[in-house]
Image (cartoon, rainbow, N blue to C red):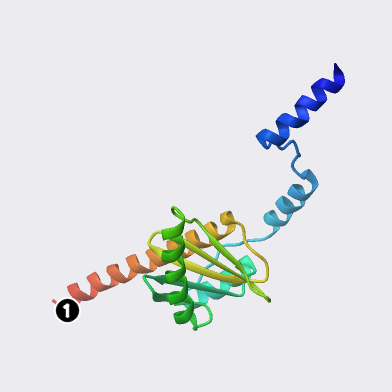
Amino acid sequence: MNFFSKTIGRLASILLDLDDTQQPKEQIAALNDFLTKCKFEIDASNLDDFLGLLKKKHFVDSITVSKAGEVIASSEGNGVGESFASAALIEFIGKQFADPETILMKMPDFWFMIFPFNQNIYIVKAGTNLTTIEIRALAREIDAFLKKERNSRIRNNGIMKKIQN
């Protein structure tokens, strides 16, 4: 009877794709200790500095933000080709598969990751692949900075118009 229940249990876990692994408590404790000692707030005055700091924070080689093939920002200044290629790739894959969330490509020396988020396309190159959660966090940080910068520009333009009148 014991053999029968173990066999059924193994079969059910394979069919249902059950995972009974536990969280690595020692690694989580070490990461929590590291995070309490480090401050990760980025205070940058312009987008180029912000992207440079984000590269260091997330251990990536380059970050490019584009919208409909047009480069909004690039940490390396060479995002035009990547922007067009990524927009075309997302469009092609979007026609083949319903709503791709992330596109990961392994190149010989790096990973090329494409992530559409809030009408922008985020293109990241790194030595290792980032998880969707990491890419989404990166995109949210950049998106928040762009919104803050846009609101500041609108506010400053409103002040300038009042001064000119």
Q: Is residue 86 above or below residue 18?
A: below
Badge 1: few (under 14), some or many (20 or more) residues near its Cα, within 10 Å? few
Image location (x, y in percent) of residue 131 = 61, 57
The amino acid at mark 1 is Gln
Q: Which residue is mark 1?
A: 164
* In this rendering, position of residue 108 left or right of residue 140: right
Image location (x, y in percent) of residue 117 = 44, 59
Quadrant of res 165: bottom left
Q: Residue furthest bottom?
A: 78
Please give the name of the residue rendered at 41% of the width and 65% of the height, measured from the top-left corner: 91
* In this rendering, position of residue 119 left or right of residue 59: left
Please give the name of the residue rendered at 74% of the width and 31% of the height, measured from the top-left corner: 11
Quadrant of res 69: bottom left
* In this rendering, position of residue 35 left or right of residue 116: right
Res 40 seen here: yes
Quarter of the N terminus within the rendering: top right
Q: Residue furthest left?
A: 165
Res 45 seen here: no
Count of marks overlaid on the render: 1
Image location (x, y in percent) of residue 100 = 48, 56
Please give the name of the residue rendered at 46% of the width and 68% of the height, measured from the top-left corner: 89
Secondary element at tag 1: helix
Q: Nearer the viewer, residue 31 or 164?
A: 31
Q: Nearer the viewer, residue 143 or 84?
A: 84
Image location (x, y in percent) of residue 7 = 80, 27
